[in-house]
Image (cartoon, rainbow, N blue to C red):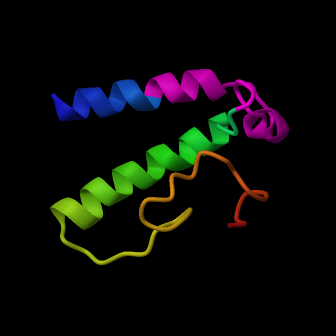
Amino acid sequence: MPEGWLDFQRATLALKCAGLDHDQLRTALVEPSAMALLGLVRHRAEIERNGFQRVLAGLDIPFLFGKEGDAPFRPRGRPGER
């Protein structure tokens, strides 16, 4: 069941992002919120990475897009920038 839920979450996010360019992915979804689709993609990646590598495997790995408790909903910079 968890694998099916992850597949659903990934597919839904991919569908929402399909066909959008980088600037569109960085645009806030609803004002005044700073949340953008690119931020949700980063958030999803951080959640899965945390769940599998930190929680299940017990690895001490750095956060990709922020620090603990810092939800990366507002993308900063271009791909590869933090």
In the rendered image, the quadrant that contains the N terminus is: top left
Per the image, is 48 magenta?
no
The quarter of the picture where the C terminus appears is: bottom right
- 45 horizontally vs 51: left or right: right
The residue lying toward the viewer, choosing from 76 and 25, is 76
Who's the residue at 56% across and 39% down the image? 40
Residue at the image position 38 percent from the left and 50 percent from the top: 47
Residue 7: quadrant of the picture: top left
Q: How many marks?
A: 0
Judge from the rendering whether residue 29 lies leftward or rightward of residue 43; answer left or right: right
Q: Which residues are magenta?
A: 11-32
Residue 39 % position (x, y):
61, 44
Indicate whether 21 appears above or below 72: above
Where is residue 4 drawn, in percent x and y?
A: 25, 27
Asked if residue 52 is positioned above or below residue 14 in the image, the reply reads below
Residue at the spot x=46%, y=44% of the render?
A: 44
In the shown orientation, is residue 16 left or right of residue 31? left
Residue positioned most to the right? 23
Percent x, y of residue 6: 32, 34
Compared with 68, 5 (above or below) is: above
Q: In the drawing, does residue 28 fall left or right of residue 11?
A: right
Furthest-front residue in this view: 32
Residue located 69% across and 50% down the image = 75
Q: How far from the left and from the top, in percent, is residue 55?
A: 20, 61
